[in-house]
Amino acid sequence: MKRWEEHVRKVVPYTPGEQPNCQGMIKLNTNENPYPPAPGVQKALEELTPESFRLYPDPAASELVNALAEYYGKDRDRFFVGVGSDDVIAMAFQTFFNSETPILFPDISYSFYSVWAELFGVPYRCPALDEEFRLVKEDYFAENGGIIFPNPNAPTGLYLGLEAVEEIVANNPDSVVIVDEAYVDFAGPSAMELVDRYDNLLVVQTFSKSRSMAGLRIGFAYGQPQLIRYLNDVKYSFNSYTMNLPSLKLGAAALKDRAYFEHTVEKIKATRERVKKELAALGFHFPDSGSNFIFASHETCPARELFEALKKENIYVRYFASPRISNYLRITVGTDDEMDALLEFLKSYLNKK
């Protein structure tokens, strides 16, 4: 090892899902929305000119922040935006998780949490989900340096009711609790409605899933103004221009079409519920997903085998070779035609076993 390598920060990075680009593929492995963004996004894109790219974007991201404030009927000083929810959460780790006491997040959860903790030198502990993959709220009543969990959880898809979320927040007045709601639009009420009562609660959402804008990388946090000010202080100490101009303008445009957004979400939920029934009939079992994916395991056929067989047919799902979940596949809910093709292959393959 060269001498300069002694001072390199060495981490085990996050591994994203495959991004194949095959003709005729069915891509159900990264929880993207199968439908296009709202029509107003296309119109806003056409209005951008090359001249607009000559200047730096607004460091305060005012157009997008104002659009969020109008959409949710809240004050703009309660919103923080970033380059996808990953950027927002990473900034929150740097801002709020600086205690020597371990932060808490579930043992089966978004695997980026442990990566950020290692990268930023944050001690952490991972309480185990129960046998049915449910978060045990009492495990989060212990001393901690902060708490983060997805709701619905990833990759299990299970949604934790707001009453339990509030208990966790209320029992930790001296810690910042971050609720990562990347999939909440497919589940139930958002913890945003709890923020008025708790100054230690930060809710993070993304435009990547329900708003079909994963390629633009737009995420935001909602909390009381003091939390948002702290986040902005760290952001401006790191990079003033975190969000590019197209993301700001197209993100604001997406928020203007509530009817399209709600229609698309309902289509995905309807497909999800239909596919759950058909997978169950084929011998799969799974938690009751409240997300845009299904976390499924077959009663006789190993998940890795199914993963490889599907891949040969250009059908991509996500497989995790991790403790407790190595016999599960995470299957994104695609269009009805895509899900029918998946089900048809599974039926054929399993009948030959």
Image: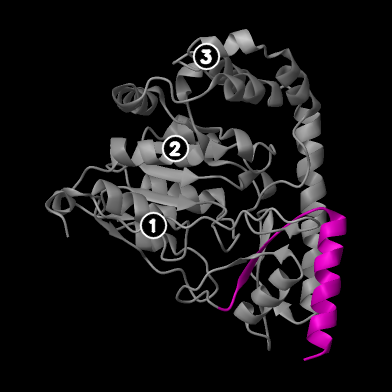
Where residue 87 is drawn, which disc sits there? 2
Instruction: Pick out the residue farthest to the bottom.
Output: 353
Which residue corresponds to mark 1?
A: 105
Q: Is residue 185 left or right of residue 280?
A: left
Which residue corresponds to mark 3?
A: 62
Q: Amino acid at mark 2?
A: Asp
Q: Position of residue 67 (x, y in %)?
A: 61, 18
Whether residue 304 is visible, yes or no, is yes
Viewer-side label of 1, 2: 2
Q: Is residue 8 left or right of residue 306?
A: left
- Considering the image in quadrants, where does the C terminus appear? bottom right
Instruction: Pick out the residue farthest to the front.
Output: 2
Q: Residue at x 36, y 63 (%)?
A: 139
Secondary structure, mark 3, is helix
The earlier-in-sequence mark between 3 and 1 is 3
Q: Amino acid at mark 1?
A: Phe
Secondary structure, mark 1, is loop
Q: Which residues are magenta?
A: 327-353
> Would you say the residues marked 1 and 2 are in contact, meaning their CB atoms lie under 8 Å apart?
no
Viewer-side label of 3, 1: 3
